[in-house]
Image (cartoon, grey):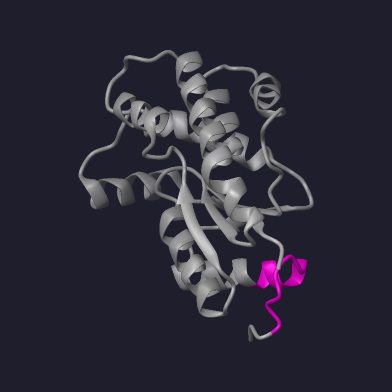
Amino acid sequence: MEGKLIVLEGIDGSGKSSIGMMLTDTLNSLGIKSIYTFEPTHAYYGSKLRESMLSKDLKPEEELSLFIADRKEHIKHMIKPAINDGYVIVLDRYIYSSIAYQGAKGIDKEYIYNLHKDFILQPDIVFILHLDIETALNRIMEKRGFVDRFENKNYLEEVDKIFCSFDASYIHHIDASKSQQSIKDEILNTIKESKILPLNSLQ
């Protein structure tokens, strides 16, 4: 089977990580070799980004440069080789997060896309999870006890507006207020209907 790229997007607290790991486990249980991964990574550029999230040291343009450098390395050293080996990659965050998060800080969205176009891989399917901002922030506080500088209500509202604007045949918008099992089932059914993976055994 050819490798595939499945992308999960949405604001922090929307449940991407949990759904991504559940989806990966289910695909592996069906005999479809799959890997869950995320951005920013824990590699050099991703680690720099994670450090910056707890401070206000970086300008939006500097953040974007680090996100792009991290993504480029991630694609080159992990995502592309795995896809070439026939793996399904379930990816938590991708170019759409950069367009939404840095776009909400005033950077031109087309400019962000153009910085990616020479190296970005086209996803086979994208799921954008949408959740009420207050609920998302409450989830974050319950999970780790604090929010980082990307996580304030007004900013996340602008981010979600940009996420809502993405429109293509391979992009699907998901109500993330439902149970994780319901969300996972909806995603699996959409993948089955799209025929990007052999999920005929899925009931």
Residue at the far right in the pictured view:
169
Residue at 69% across, 41% down: 166
Give x and y (percent) for residue 70: 48, 31
Q: Position of residue 163 (x, y in %)?
A: 60, 40
Q: Position of residue 98 (x, y in %)?
A: 55, 31
Q: Residue at x 47, y 51 (%)?
A: 37
Is residue 179 among what the camera can see?
no
The residue at 60%/30% (across/down) is 99
Rendering quarter of residue 51: top left
Q: Residue furthest left?
A: 145
Magenta stretch bounds: 189-200
Magenta span includes 195: yes
Label total for image = 0
For the C terminus, the image quarter is bottom right
Q: Quadrant of the N terminus?
A: bottom right
- Above-or-below relation of 16 to 150: below
**Does the magenta segment cover residue 164?**
no
Q: Residue at x 54, y 27 (%)?
A: 68
Residue 57 location in percent, x, y? 32, 14
